[in-house]
Structure formats: structure tokens, C-alpha cells
Image (spheres, rainbow, N blue to C red):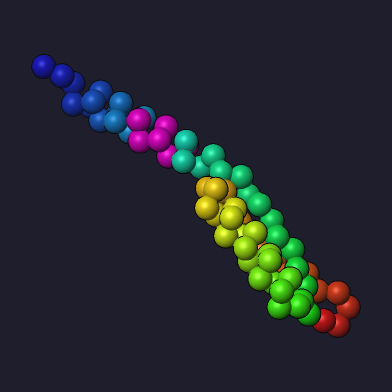
Amino acid sequence: MMDFGRFMYEQSKKVHAMKQNQRSGQVKEVKFRPHINEHDLSTKINYVQRFLEEGNRAKINLMFRGRE
């Protein structure tokens, strides 16, 4: 016989540990401005896609200067 409460506790611990291991990806940041050339934009998009394929998270930062 097994204590059901203990079994549920162990199961929740296993699920919690598995979720922690999934969050191990690093956040990569890509910065660009609103007036960016088409080729430069496509290059930065490729960087973001590569980061996501590697399992990292990507953060896109749009920077404005002055009246942009």
C-alpha cells in the first residue's frame, strides 16, 4: 500500500523540477532603429531566428532617438 498524499507530493516535485529545467534558455537581445535598411533588417531577423532555433529566448528592442 502507498500513501496517496505522499505520491501526489512526489509527482508535483517531479513536475516542478522538469519545468525548471525547461527555462534554462538565455535571453538574447537584438536592437534596431525605425529607419533601418531592408538588408540590415533581414540580417537581424535571421539572428533572431537562429537564437530561437538554439532554444534561447529573443528580445527585440526598438530604439528611438530624438523625433524618430
Predominant SS along the magenta part: helix
- Tell me which segment is drawn in magenta: 14-20
Q: Is residue 3 left or right of residue 17?
A: left
Residue drawn 51% across and 42% down? 23
Q: Quadrant of residue 68?
A: bottom right
Regarding residue 24, the answer to whether it shows in the image is: yes
Residue drawn 65% across and 59% down? 47
The image position of residue 16, as x and y in percent, is 40, 35
Residue drawn 86% across and 74% down? 65
Q: Quadrant of residue 34?
A: bottom right
Taking the view exactly as shown, the residue that stands out farthest to the right is 66
Taking the view exactly as shown, the residue that stands out farthest to the left is 1
The image position of residue 62, as x and y in percent, is 73, 69
Q: Is residue 21 above or below residue 1?
A: below
Taking the view exactly as shown, the residue that stands out farthest to the top is 1
* Membership of 48 in magenta stretch: no
